[in-house]
Image (spheres, grey):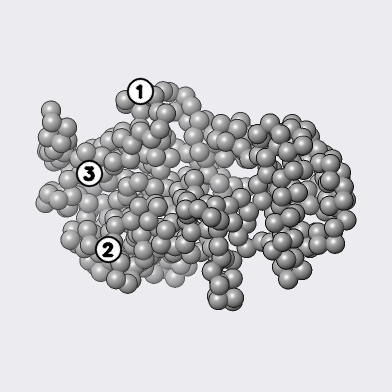
Amino acid sequence: MAQPLSGIKVVEMGMAIQGPAAGVYLSDMGAEVLKVEPPIGDSSRFHRGVNNNTPPETPGAMFIAGNRGKKSVCLDVHSEKGRDILQAMIADADVFMSNYRPVFLNRLSLDYESLRKCNPRLIYAVVNGFGPLGPDVNRPMVEGAAQARGGVANLCGPSDGLAMMPGATTADGTGAIGFALGIMTALLERERHGTGQSVSTSALGAQIFIQSWEIQQCILTGEPLQRAGSYMPNIRGPYGIYEASDGGMFLFTLVGDEGWGLLCEKGGDPELANDENWNDAFKRMGAAPEMQSEESVLNVRDRMKSIFKRKTTAEWRDFFRSRDDCIVEKIQDHSEVLSDPQVLANDYVVPMSFEGIGESMGVGNQVQLSETPAVIKRPPPQLGDSTREVMKNLGYSDQDVDEVESHTLEIRKKFLGE
């Protein structure tokens, strides 16, 4: 069965997460993604992270997550031969995508104006830290820098303490989603009207987008939101995180009137159910903040803390599971997420095979298509595993391939001190 992007060829020059994760999506949807790596490989191959006791030959988790399904072409793009091969690959491609900074791409004549001359139908897609324009277009970016610059970190953490970074790569992750969406939009435009074009997104732009509500609130009120610890900064009410008697934690959000009464009764505070400040769902969602004073908000949150503390995690989970008018979820760690039947039923994690450890599990694709579903084609590539195949398809001789492979191996040995 043909997939949506069957026949689409993508040349990717990416590292870390933001660029490569978008390439994974294109690969899952049928594109052939050729990952161009330097002689020493994408640095994320070797990033071990914490608690990682897998064999040395097993790629790092960051590399696996961002590169499964791709083919690796190992080139020294600073050499004349390497640049020639890369140019030939791009001339034969539908998409060139990269999260390298523009200053680096321009230095190698990999800017849009140069590449469109040899491939007018090319979708030229570049994602960076801070956007394609402005004084910081070439400023280096890491995950935390985009979170800080975009304001997300300022809303994370206790109200009376330091700001905190979110516990996930929200900038790179959402940046990758926007990057893939931009590429898909440009491909659709080209298929409909035959026009190639450049696509630009950024981690900073993604951070602004995912805070559309919060930033719009600041625009309307003239007041930036403040950190609220375990509570939503833009909701005045009991919406927040609470701890059970045995340490389990729950996110409590919306609850209907009947469920609210039963919750208060079960938690030993039936009087709260009739408190006029909180006696309907509209008020409990903080949809009318003028109804609740700061004192009332702090009071209901303190009473909710006491309510949750009176029962165990299992008791609360059983209670909420029996009700469909409550939106309450136990806060799970990643090991619990991996065994969650809802996660497994939707193939959000799926069986995969990795070098060094063999059969295991990996993160799947979040988009489900009924007729042409996403397919993970292969494990993350070994460095340069497709260099010979790609060069031969472009008409290079075995001698040319041997020369390139010998050159990149020599650089790699020098880097490793061998």
Q: Which mark is residue 172?
A: none
As measured in the structure, the alpha-carbon distance from the residue carrying label 1 to the one carrying label 2 is 37 Å
Label 3: few (<14), some (14–19) or many (≥20) C-alpha neighbours in 10 Å: many
**Residue where numbered disc 3 is placed:** 38
Is 404 left or right of 259, judged from the image as shown? Answer: left
Horizontal side, residue 128 vs residue 84: left or right: right
Residue at label 2? 138
Q: Which of 4 and 271 is in front in this view?
A: 271
Helix, strand, or loop for circle 2?
Answer: loop
Residue 365 location in percent, x, y?
53, 44
Q: What residue type is labelled 1?
A: Pro
Mark 2 residue crowding within 10 angstroms, few (<14) / some (14–19) / many (20+): some
Amino acid bearing label 2 = Asn
The image quadrant of residue 72 is top left
Q: Residues within 10 Å of mark 1 (few under 14, many from 20)?
A: few
Mark 1 vs 2, N-terminal side? 1
